[in-house]
Image: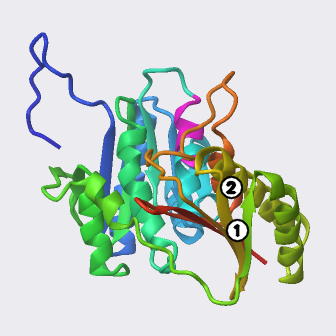
């Protein structure tokens, strides 16, 4: 954070009220001290406060808060944020948009924790970078814990690129991040998604959408999806293939396969996704359309996107 505190002169840009902090810690004591003090400061000011962290950490915070835990909105990020792409619309906006406009909202959000898979991590970094654009101008403070001992060095470097200010381990002082470059972080993790051998491959166009979607659902069932998970796969393929026909050049290729405990589907087309926040904005009341990718983010266990001059690939994971 800048040490400059004077009010801007007329005609100058006002400081952005949005605050996005990377909080580095090395042990359980530092973690509790940093998160709980942040929460208590918010409660003392009468601010709405939410804590969305992995379940084991959530128990630590709840126990440390004692009776005050009932005043805080608590979420297990392993469930609410398993897909990093749904954290902005499904966790952060859902809480931050509820209080009266202009009221300061505080959120502890931990999307990057030890144990995140290599497939999930790039989406985590892009999520952290995109928070800055999604909440620009909002009276919101988000504190993101980073475990210096449990995370690889790359994650700590990326945290400095995606957060304009940091709190160093053992301190409560906010320092500006000299490495802050969120757009570069989004671009760096816009990674190509290689083709997978053996996947069911289904080219499609407007006239074959229904047949291709049924074939994809049948393959998902054969690979072990049932019930709601199978319905989610069918819905995701419907939304993504329709988007390709309408916005991606009129044709595309749908693929479905299994990997470990997941069934994956992906759609490739010739379109280019130019809005990095596509699918991460909450729906606008009274405005139809534009919700397909948002819906996919909300129902899938992970969504990865690669877009470039040659087209766009959107890949989704569904746990069996």
The quadrant where residue 80 appears: bottom right
Task: Examine the rendering and report whether any part of residue 290 can be seen.
Answer: yes
The quadrant where residue 153 appears: bottom left
Where is residue 20 shown, x and y percent of the image? 32, 46
Q: What residue is drawn where x is 30% and y is 56%?
A: 162
Establish if 114 lies above or below 285.
below
Q: Nearer the viewer, mark 1 or mark 2?
A: 1
Residue that mark 1 sits on: 254
Task: Examine the rendering and report whether any part of residue 112 can be seen.
Answer: no
Residue that mark 2 sits on: 240
Question: Can you say which quadrant of the picture contains the N terminus?
Answer: top left
Seen in the image, is 39 located left or right of residue 2? right
79 inside magenta stretch:
no
Which residue is at the front of the view, 292 or 178? 292
Establish if 259 lies above or below 113.
below
Marks 1 and 2 sit apart, C-alpha to C-alpha, by 9 Å
Q: Which residues are magenta?
A: 91-98
Establish if 264 lies above or below 272.
below
Label 1 vs 2, first from the N-terminus: 2
Where is residue 300 shown, x and y percent of the image? 68, 62
Asked whether the residues under the numbered discs 1 and 2 touch, taking CB atoms below 8 Å apart as contact, a structural biologist would say: yes
């Amino acid at each position: 954070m800048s040490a400059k505190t004077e009010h801007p002169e007329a005609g100058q840009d006002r400081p952005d009220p949005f605050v996005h902090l990377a909080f580095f810690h090395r042990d359980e004591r530092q973690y509790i001290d940093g998160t709980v003090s942040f929460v208590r400061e918010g409660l003392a000011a009468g601010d709405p406060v939410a804590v969305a962290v992995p379940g084991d950490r959530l128990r630590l915070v709840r126990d440390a808060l004692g009776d005050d835990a009932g005043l805080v909105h608590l979420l297990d990020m392993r469930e609410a944020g398993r897909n990093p792409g749904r954290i902005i619309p499904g966790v952060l906006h859902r809480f931050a948009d509820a209080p009266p406009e202009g009221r300061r909202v505080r959120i502890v959000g931990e999307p990057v924790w030890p144990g995140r898979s290599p497939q999930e991590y790039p989406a985590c970094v892009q999520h952290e970078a995109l928070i800055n654009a999604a909440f620009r101008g909002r009276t919101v403070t988000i504190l993101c814990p980073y475990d210096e001992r449990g995370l690889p060095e790359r994650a700590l470097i990326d945290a400095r690129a995606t957060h304009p200010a940091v709190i160093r381990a053992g301190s409560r002082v906010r320092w500006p991040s000299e490495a802050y470059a969120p757009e570069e972080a989004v671009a760096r993790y816009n990674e190509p998604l290689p083709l997978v051998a053996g996947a069911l491959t289904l080219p499609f166009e407007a006239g074959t959408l229904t047949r291709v979607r049924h074939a994809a659902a049948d393959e998902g069932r054969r690979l072990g999806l049932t019930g709601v998970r199978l319905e989610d796969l069918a819905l995701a393929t419907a939304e993504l293939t329709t988007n390709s026909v309408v916005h991606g050049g009129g044709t595309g290729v749908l693929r479905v396969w299994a990997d470990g405990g997941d069934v994956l589907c992906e759609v490739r087309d010739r379109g280019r996704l130019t809005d990095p926040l596509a699918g991460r904005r909450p729906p606008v009341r009274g405005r139809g359309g534009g919700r397909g990718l948002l819906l996919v983010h909300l129902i899938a266990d992970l969504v990865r996107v690669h877009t470039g001059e040659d087209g766009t690939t959107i890949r989704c994971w569904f746990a069996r």
